[in-house]
Image: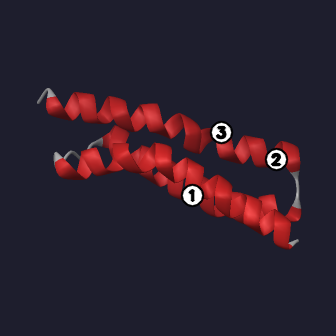
Amino acid sequence: MGIRIDNMLANLKEGALMYLPIALLAVYFDISNVWTSNAALVTIISRIIYIPVYIIGIEKLRTLIWAPSFLAIPAMAYGIYLGIGE
């Protein structure tokens, strides 16, 4: 169980390395729109649900839960692109 928790934390850190720069850009440029807010919400919810599913070890469900947070990164980038153009 300890190894599984360590792996889950490492995975969350890797995900944060992809998400955090995009989220910080949205904050820096003060951009908040449907794309950025929904992407942030999807990321937070899917990562919260991901934690117990990873620890329990449900592999196929884990991937389904992880995928929306991964897709939220380009969605947030698109929202930033739309916000800069305003």
**Residue holding disc 1:** 45
Instruction: Tell me the CA gap for discs 1 and 3.
Output: 12 Å
**Residue holding disc 2:** 61
Is tag 2's residue or tag 3's residue first in the polypeptide sequence?
2
77 relative to 29, above or below: above
Residue 17 lies, in percent from the top left, at 48, 48
* Amino acid type at image mark 1: Ile
37 on left or right of 60: left
> Residue 67: which numbered mark, if any?
3
62 on left or right of 37: right
Q: Secondary structure at mark 2?
A: helix
Quadrant that contains the C terminus: top left
41 relative to 68, above or below: below
Seen at 54% across and 34% down, the residue is 71
Instruction: Tell me the CA gap for discs 2 and 1.
Output: 15 Å
Q: Secondary structure at mark 3?
A: helix
* Amino acid type at image mark 2: Leu
* Amino acid type at image mark 3: Ala
55 on left or right of 79: right
Are the residues tagged 2 and 1 within 8 Å (C-beta)?
A: no
Task: Out of 75 and 4, give the one closest to the viewer.
Answer: 4
Q: Residues within 10 Å of mark 2 (few under 14, many from 20)?
A: few
Q: Residues within 10 Å of mark 3 (few under 14, many from 20)?
A: few
